[in-house]
Amino acid sequence: MIPSIDQQHYARQTTDELRRSFLVTGLFQPDQVVLNHWESDRTVIGSAVPGTKNLPLPCPKDLAAPFFNERRELGLINLGGTGTVEVDGTSHRLETHDCLYVGRGKRDVVFASHDATRPAQYYLLSYPAHTTYPTVVTSLAATPGVTLGSAATANARSLHKFIHPGGIRSCQLVMGMTVLQPGSVWNTMPPHTHLRRTEVYLYFNLPEGQAVFHFAGRPDETRNLLVHDRQAVLSPPWSVHSGVGTSNYSFIWGMGGENQEFADMDAAPIATLR
């Protein structure tokens, strides 16, 4: 389990300690399900890359449950080739960038690819759930993006909401994707915090050799993490979360906690950042 870090501990951490506390690496391993359990809001971040064999979703010992979704909900987005996710015997086809929500109580989840030479690559995010909502698939094309930013400020981007109160219903999970336009490199600037929920960023579509400098920490004491393609950053409620890349890129954002309202945030104006 990745432990929660408070603001005082964070302020004294070295670069290596920051990376161990807030950066998730080693995702998307061939023919494996990888799961990371973060103590904050009992978040699970993971991946599944079925190639030569189908992969069932395991239940780690620290969840203390007979199966993964006994008291949890799961969101996943396919970043690879065409695949199928079977949920309690029902198959759901997922193309690239399709999203699947799996509700609480679903016992058997199995990941598969249609072509082992171009496998599906599922990014997984899960939070505890208090009730059951239907299992639903949606696509990027069926989720109109909201245009944000501008080329003048190098942050022209489209934001797509998949799992949220106005889309796929869930208990606390909120999940979507943001795509930066060519020539734009900044995301979520000016930044913000939201004290009633945690957030996880997965950066992807970064060209080889490029990186994102992700800014974190209290607005008056920011730090940065150097993030490469398909690595995730954990953002506790007290931390800002913003980034600038050496190229344009995309990222999946996911949140869980007390409130699902997307606009529930406390702005950190640029002039006040340190």
Image: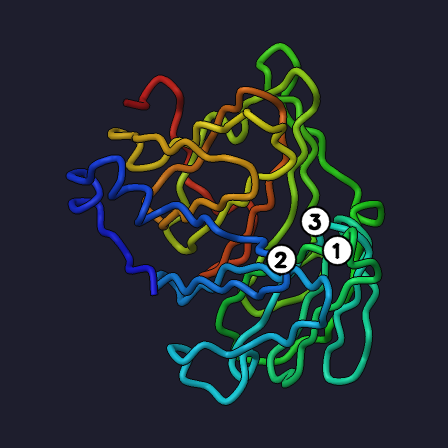
Q: Position of residue 70 (x, y in %)?
A: 54, 84
The residue to which callout 2 is attached is: 30
Q: Which residue is mark 3?
A: 79
Q: Nearer the viewer, residue 139 or 62?
A: 62
Residue 200 image point, x, y percent: 48, 49
On-image quarter of the N terminus: bottom left
Query: How would you rate the neighbour count of disc 1 (Cα within 10 Å): few for under 14, some for 14-19, many for 20 or more?
Result: many
Up-down: is 29 above or below 151? below
The first of marks 2 and 1 along the sequence is: 2
| Nearer to us in this view, 55 or 98 | 55
21 horizontally vs 156: left or right: left
Say whether marks 2 and 3 touch (CB < 8 Å): no
- The numbered mark at residue 119 is 1
C-alpha separation, residue under disc 2 versus residue under disc 1:
9 Å
Determine the residue positioned at 78% across, 47% down.
Answer: 140
Question: Which is more toward the observer, 204 or 55?
Answer: 55
Mark 2 in CB contact with mark 1 (< 8 angstroms): yes
Residue at left offset 61%, top offset 31%: 206
For residue 73, the mark is none
Q: Left or right? Give the position of 204 relative to 38.
A: right
What residue do we see at 58% from left, 72% from top?
Answer: 73
Check disc 3: other Cα within 10 Å, few if <14, some if 14-19, many if 20+: many
- What secondary structure is marked by label 2? loop
Q: Which mark is first along the chain, 3 or 2? A: 2
Q: Secondary structure at mark 3?
A: loop
Q: Nearer the viewer, mark 1 or mark 3?
A: 1
